[in-house]
């Protein structure tokens, strides 16, 4: 027997997809310095596919940002960017978000990569220190973060101390310390949240996960909600992820 569709529900779904596409078009216009690039025809179908897959709007924006960062790095821009060019980056960021939130069904994002180069670890820590220092300089975080910034700086020097890089147990021990420091960072940031900000982050996390909620066991949803909340707290205070996955 053919499945019966509720016309009202279908209409609401189409309206939501159309609104998603309008938001993407508006964001793309801003990224293109005001040049209007319409999301119509095949481009509309492409973006509608993101909405149908449950890509949160902010995650799509991050994917677009990632493409533009590479585009700017190549030098002066020659022409406005079409949304189609951002497809791979949007889906990459979406996959990263799903793994971090636990909606991908695996924990692979939490397994350290043993093939990572020590130079990459040092570079990661250097970026962490820079972002923490920048967050403090702009007032996003206060002096209560100073001891933690000092400890991360110490770990950066540890990673740089051996020209050949850390190996084996020493590397694993450092990765464990970074995970602990990352937990401290989030705990400090959450203490800075007032009730209004905490409620806003919780509501946004729930909205991001709404397309996946019905297919997730309660415990998996709880973990995904915590991960989404943590990411939003980081964004609010412009904080990096200290742990290296």
Image: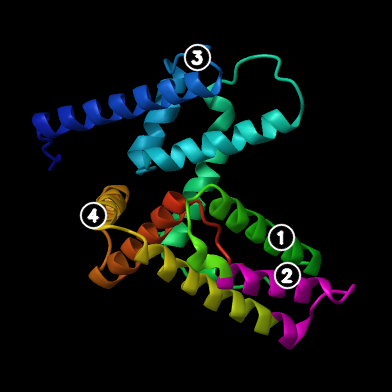
Q: Residue furthest front?
A: 143
Cα separation between marks 4 and 3? 35 Å
Instruction: Check if mark 1's residue and mark 2's residue have beta carbons within 8 Å.
Output: yes
Q: Position of residue 210 (x, y in %)?
A: 26, 50
Q: Count neighbours of disc 4 (C-alpha within 10 A) and say few if under 14, some if 14 to 19, many if 20 or more.
A: few
Q: As rendered, which of 184 and 175 lies closer to the eye?
A: 184
- For the record, the magenta segment spans 147-171
- Residue depicted at x 46% and y 56%: 234
State how far apart marks 2 and 4 are (Cα).
35 Å
The residue where tag 4 is placed is: 199
Residue 37 image label: 3
The answer to whether 144 appears left or right of 81 in the picture is left
Q: Secondary structure at mark 2?
A: helix
Which residue is outermost to the right? 163
- Identify the residue shown where x is 55% and y is 17%: 33
Q: Viewed as shown, does residue 77 lie left or right of 208? A: right
Q: Earlier in the sequence, mark 1 or mark 3?
A: 3
Horizontally, residue 114 falls left or right of residue 201, namely right
Judged from the image, the secondary structure of the residue bearing numbered disc 4 is: helix
The residue pinned by badge 2 equals 156
Q: Tell which of 11 and 97 is nearer to you.
A: 97
Q: Is residue 159 magenta?
A: yes
User: Alpha-carbon distance for marks 1 and 3?
Assistant: 37 Å
Q: Is residue 114 above or below residue 71?
A: below
Q: Which residue is mark 1?
A: 126
SS under mark 1: helix
Disc 1 or 4, which lies upstream in sequence? 1
Q: Quadrant of the C terminus?
A: bottom right
Quadrant of image for the N terminus = top left
User: Image check: 244 left or right of 220?
Assistant: right
Residue 107 or 227: which is nearer the viewer? Answer: 227
Is label 3 in a helix, a strand or a loop?
A: loop
């Amino acid at each position: 027997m053919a499945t019966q569709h509720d016309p009202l529900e279908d209409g609401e779904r189409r309206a939501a997809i159309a609104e998603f596409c309008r938001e993407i078009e508006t964001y793309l216009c801003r990224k293109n310095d005001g040049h209007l690039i319409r999301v119509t025809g095949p481009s509309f179908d492409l973006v509608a596919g993101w909405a149908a897959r449950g890509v949160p709007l902010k995650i799509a924006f991050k994917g677009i940002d990632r493409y533009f960062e590479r585009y700017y790095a190549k030098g002066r821009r020659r022409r406005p960017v079409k949304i189609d060019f951002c497809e791979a980056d949007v889906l990459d960021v979406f996959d990263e978000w799903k793994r971090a939130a636990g909606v991908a069904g695996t924990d692979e994002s939490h397994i350290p990569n043993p093939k990572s180069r020590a130079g990459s670890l040092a570079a990661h820590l250097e970026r962490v220190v820079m972002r923490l220092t920048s967050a403090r300089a702009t007032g996003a975080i206060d002096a209560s973060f100073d001891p933690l910034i000092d400890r991360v700086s110490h770990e950066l020097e540890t990673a740089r101390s051996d020209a050949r890089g850390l190996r084996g147990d020493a590397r694993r021990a450092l990765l464990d310390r970074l995970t602990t420091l990352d937990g401290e960072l989030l705990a400090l940031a959450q203490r800075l949240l007032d009730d209004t900000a905490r409620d806003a982050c919780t509501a946004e996390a729930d909205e991001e996960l709404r397309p996946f909620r019905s297919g997730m066991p309660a415990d998996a949803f709880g973990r995904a909600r915590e991960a989404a909340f943590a990411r939003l707290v980081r964004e609010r205070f412009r904080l990096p992820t200290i742990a290296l996955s």
